[in-house]
Image (cartoon, rainbow, N blue to C red):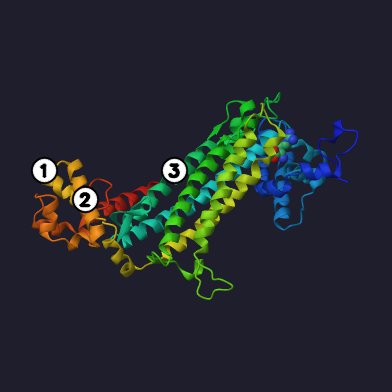
Amino acid sequence: KDKALWSGRFASSPAEIMQKYSQSLDVDWHFYKEDLEGSKAHGRMLHHIGILSKEELDKIINALSEIEEEVEKGLLQPKISLEDVHMNLEARLIEKLGPLGAKIHTGRSRNDQVATDYRLFMKKSITAIETKLLLFLEVLLQRAEKDVDIIVPGFTHLQHAQPVSLGHHWMAYFWKFTRDLERFKTAYKTTDVNPLGAGALAGSTLPLDREFTRKELNFAVNSENSLDTVSDRDYLLEFLFAASTFVLHTSGLSEDLILWCTSEFDFIEPPDAFCTGSSMMPNKKNPDALELTRGKTSGVLSSLYDLMINIKGLPLTYNRDLQEDKRPVLHTITTINMILDVLTPLIEGIIVKEQNIEPHLNKGFLLATDVAEYLVAKDVPFRETHEIVGGIVQYCVKQNKSLEDLSIEEWQRYCPAFEDDIYSILSPRLAVDRRKTFGGTARVEVKRQVAVGKEMIITL
Ligand code: ARG
């Protein structure tokens, strides 16, 4: 039977149920590569300060590489009696090298070790997410460029408001996701700190060279305070917050698109590859990928709360509660990777049904603001113009007319300032192009945004 590496203090071993309760292998075995990488760096540092000879170091490095191969080939199966990834890999090193293997943990604790593994793991995970997010941003830019000439009703309160370019709509999400990418980058910076050498909580009596391991492991800086180091999980919270705003955005985008592919809207056709049918109703084509994206939001948002609630009220320094910090983060990493893998080709493959959108542009008095602003140009104060046009809309609703149907006499009944040129502004396309304010929906402005966006993602 395998003895825990801390068994010296104990007269008997933990209960079987305690071993199951205590183990973290189902989550931290994911860190085996980082754990071995950390051990190699630590070993090299121990040689550098004269604790390991060159020969000892070489044996340790070789054995650690062999262990990596054993794990990859499935030859080394972790045991729950050895609790976690750290003790399983160390026990294997001792099995291979005897007393020499037992030297690797000199000046190290699992408390700084787990922080090191986790930060290395997160740096890789965040980088991979950033790469996928960039591809997604590129697809949004392409869509915006392609759809800039398509005019759709813009909504507030889910009621028709003003016409906008579909390119403008895609670009709105582009900017949201650009900020998410920046938040992931900030989380990366917070993560990029070397904890190794903090020991269990207070540092070490041995002359450990933290700068040496920092360089070995390619961390930007060393952590400043050992007590902070072994208890700090801020970097995970920052990652989870970035992930949370990201899923809030993917959820909103999904909701827009789910609406747009209802029979009532019928603005778009999502690709078959991301829809499913019904087991009973042969007519169904359901936008499941989008619904799942909306649904998966809750799990990610919960992850942020899960970890915050875990940390709330923990005294310094390491407490075993912190072992529960992995499941929410791993869940989130898996989920947002899948969301990106699905949404990127889905958005790319959407077919826009322009002919179905067109009739909607004449509903809901989308151009009422344009009429009010037309009167402003004729020097009528805006509050008055608002009131006047409100009355016209009310009249049209009663008469079942649209603005274009009104005769010049009808217009002038509400305000003498109306002239024949009123008809020339009643075009949704023109209404879009007249909104040339910086960041407005005019096609020239959307094209400007796309150009800025293209420049920007090169630097991200
Ligand atoms: N498995 C532990 C974790 O994930 C490693 C640190 C354990 N330290 C301790 N003193 N028990 O947090």
For marks 2 and 3, the one nearer the N-term is 3
Q: Which residue is mark 3?
A: 182
- Residue 391 — which label? 2
Picture coordinates of residue 312 (x, y %)?
A: 62, 32
Residue at which label 1 appears: 379
Question: Nearer the N terminus, badge 1 or badge 3?
Answer: 3
The answer to the question of whether label 2 and label 3 lie on touching residues, with beta carbons closer than 8 A, is: no
Could you give the CA–CA distance between mark 2 and mark 3, rounded to whole angstroms?
47 Å
Quarter, ligand 1: top right
The picture places residue 335, in percent across and down from the top left corner, at 57, 53
Kind of residue at badge 3: Glu
Question: Any atom of ligand 1 within 8 Å of the CB at mark 2?
Answer: no
In front of the other: 449 or 313: 313
Looking at the picture, how far across and down is residue 33, in whole percent?
Answer: 66, 48
- In-image side of 37 versus 415 (left or right): right
Q: Amino acid at mark 2?
A: Gly
Secondary element type, mark 3: helix
Query: Where, by quadrant of the figure, is residue 408 drawn?
Result: bottom left
